[in-house]
């Protein structure tokens, strides 16, 4: 359908709606189940469930049709799928076999495959070894070696806890280097600006076998009369060798608004031992406390983690005479201590609840580990996850909704223009996970509508919908499980791919709300 009319005021009744839109949008009547002959949609269009007639748009439920009209989005941009969790046929299906960019909804595949193959108790182990003598005074005359494991969860708080165990084990001073083997992930060079030209956005952090604090740091700002200019600025976590040059003026008149637009931020690019973060501008007092998360622009690979580690070791009361550098794991190491991650069930919760892209990338690569080579690659992860999903969703010898172009993996996070799936494939995967022994762990990792995570602002299905949300420029999506008024549970997938997908919230909410009301 190519015809498109901007949304107007909402009519009061279905009859008024049909009268208003029939002349302007021929398929609007068909969307609401009217009797006006609709124009066929161009291929690819497939619809099952509530279909008016072959080759015509389906008779969408009135709330969804109204939301679609109000949004001004063309029906060709929308895929919908609603089906009972244990049903063989959908209750509503619209363009369910059209591949779409689903953004962060793709994390449902990565986290589900991980739980099914690794198990909920899986943990990452970062091994430490000493190649010198640790004396009674806590002085190590030699190097500390670390074997990076790709742990997605080593944030600043967990790092501090790990280093306290080092201190408790008697280590006080390292008269050598900290040598990190980061070779587990065999990755091509990474360009943080490649996706959207915004390399400082924290979601653009790349995977790393030794990832600390998610590759990011946050500027913290708060009004403070005792600080120069009336604004206190900090950097969290601290980065060794990084100075903060903040010269802000407190603005007591302006509303908060988009306060970042009023500030000028720059970071010294030189790969020197010391770098400086410069911040200038006026900060509205109305903003109170704020945080500005940033992906750290690394001058060299591993720089961010090295700076985070060194600062944390100093804060723990340790001393490092040498440097933090890359190097090979010793052939005959003397084991010392392991850093152990939380169980996978907890890591998956952080990934899905808060849609953490770099953690999803780390997990995806873990699934691509080749036992023979000892390395994890993107190609290996793509192959493993795709094969697992296709096998699990196969309904019989000839029916597999995830076969061929219906599923294309890239980095496992959804932050990609290549990574796509169909609504039918995603719905079938949700059914697979619903029937899986890992269902409780997986479902509990999803945001609850109106309650927490990325779905906390979704009014439809409040407290009764576990939904993964996704958004990119030109893409908006939801997928998960909704419980209706009678206690029945529905798989719901809704995806919009269009330059105006930012206005699709009403369509997504209407679909969830319709399922929550029992899909009448």
Image (spheres, rainbow, N blue to C red):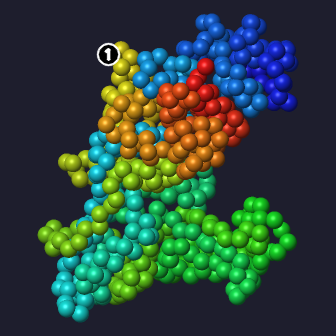
Q: What x and y, as percent, mark residue 422? A: 50, 28
User: Could you tell me which quadrant the C terminus lies in?
Assistant: top right
The furthest residue to the bottom: 137
**Is 285 displayed left or right of 174 in the figure?**
right
Q: Is residue 10 above or below residue 124?
A: above
The furthest residue to the front: 486
**Residue under numbered circle 1:** 397
Q: Quadrant of residue 385?
A: top left
Within-10-Å neighbours for mark 1: few <14, some 14–19, many 20+: few
Residue sitting nearer the eye, 175 or 234: 234
Q: Is residue 266 above or below residue 72?
A: below
Q: What x and y, as percent, mark residue 306? A: 41, 73
Q: Quadrant of residue 100?
A: top right
For the point 49% across and 67% down, the residue is 298
Q: Quadrant of residue 45?
A: top right
The image shows a total of numbered marks equal to: 1
For the point 20% across and 86% down, the residue is 134
For the point 39% across and 68% down, the residue is 158
User: Could you tell me which quadrant the N terminus lies in?
Assistant: top right
Q: Is residue 196 above or below residue 213?
A: above
Helix, strand or loop for disc 1:
loop
Residue sitting nearer the eye, 500 or 454: 454
For the point 36% across and 64% down, the residue is 210
The answer, for residue 74, to whether it is visible in the render is no
Residue sitting nearer the eye, 181 or 27: 27
**Is 439 displayed left or right of 371 in the figure?**
right
Q: What x and y, as percent, mark residue 88? A: 43, 17
The answer, for residue 124, to whether it is visible in the render is yes
Q: What x and y, as percent, mark residue 384? A: 32, 38
């Amino acid at each position: 359908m190519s015809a498109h009319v901007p949304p107007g005021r909402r009519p009061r009744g279905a009859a008024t709606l049909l009268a208003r839109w029939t002349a302007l949008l021929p398929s609007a009547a068909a969307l609401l189940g009217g009797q006006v002959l609709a124009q066929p949609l161009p291929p690819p269009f497939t619809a099952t469930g509530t279909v008016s007639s072959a080759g015509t748009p389906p008779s969408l439920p009135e709330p969804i049709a109204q939301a679609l009209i109000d949004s001004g989005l063309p029906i060709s941009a929308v895929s919908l799928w609603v089906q009972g969790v244990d049903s063989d046929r959908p209750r509503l299906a619209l363009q369910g076999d059209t591949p779409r960019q689903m953004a962060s909804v793709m994390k449902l595949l990565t986290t589900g495959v991980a739980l099914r193959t690794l198990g909920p108790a899986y943990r990452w182990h970062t091994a430490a070894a000493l190649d010198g003598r640790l004396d009674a005074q806590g002085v190590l005359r030699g190097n500390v070696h670390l074997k990076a494991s790709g742990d997605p969860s080593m944030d600043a708080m967990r790092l501090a806890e790990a280093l306290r165990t080092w201190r408790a084990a008697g280590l006080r001073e390292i008269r050598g280097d900290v040598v990190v083997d980061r070779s587990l992930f065999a990755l091509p060079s990474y360009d943080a600006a490649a996706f959207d030209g915004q390399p400082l956005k924290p979601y653009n952090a790349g995977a790393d076998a030794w990832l600390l604090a998610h590759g990011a740091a946050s500027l913290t700002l708060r009004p403070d009369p005792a600080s120069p200019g009336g604004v206190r600025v900090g950097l969290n976590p601290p980065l060794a060798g990084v100075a903060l040059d903040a010269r802000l003026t407190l603005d007591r008149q302006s509303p908060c608004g988009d306060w970042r637009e009023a500030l000028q931020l720059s970071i010294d690019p030189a790969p020197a031992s010391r770098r400086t973060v410069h911040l200038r501008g006026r900060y509205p007092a109305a903003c109170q406390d704020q945080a500005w998360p940033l992906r750290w622009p690394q001058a060299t690979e591993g720089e961010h983690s090295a700076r985070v580690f060194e600062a944390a070791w100093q804060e723990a009361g340790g001393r490092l005479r040498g440097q933090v550098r890359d190097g090979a794991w010793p052939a005959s190491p003397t084991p010392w201590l392991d850093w152990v991650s939380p169980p996978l069930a907890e890591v998956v919760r952080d990934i899905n609840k808060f849609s953490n892209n770099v953690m999803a990338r780390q997990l995806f690569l873990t699934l691509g580990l080749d036992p023979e080579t000892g390395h994890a690659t993107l190609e290996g992860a793509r192959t493993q996850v795709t094969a697992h999903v296709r096998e699990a969703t196969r309904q019989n010898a000839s029916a597999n909704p995830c076969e061929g172009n219906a599923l294309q993996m890239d980095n496992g996070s959804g932050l990609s223009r290549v990574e796509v799936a169909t609504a039918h494939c995603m719905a079938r995967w949700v059914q697979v996970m619903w029937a899986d022994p890992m269902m409780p762990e997986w479902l509990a990792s999803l945001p609850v509508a109106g309650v927490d995570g990325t779905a906390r602002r979704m009014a439809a299905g409040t407290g009764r919908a576990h939904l993964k949300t996704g958004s990119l420029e030109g893409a908006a999506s939801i997928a998960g499980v909704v419980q209706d008024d009678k206690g029945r549970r529905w798989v719901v997938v809704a995806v919009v791919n269009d330059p105006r997908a930012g206005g699709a919230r009403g369509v997504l909410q209407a679909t969830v709300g319709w399922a929550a009301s029992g899909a009448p």
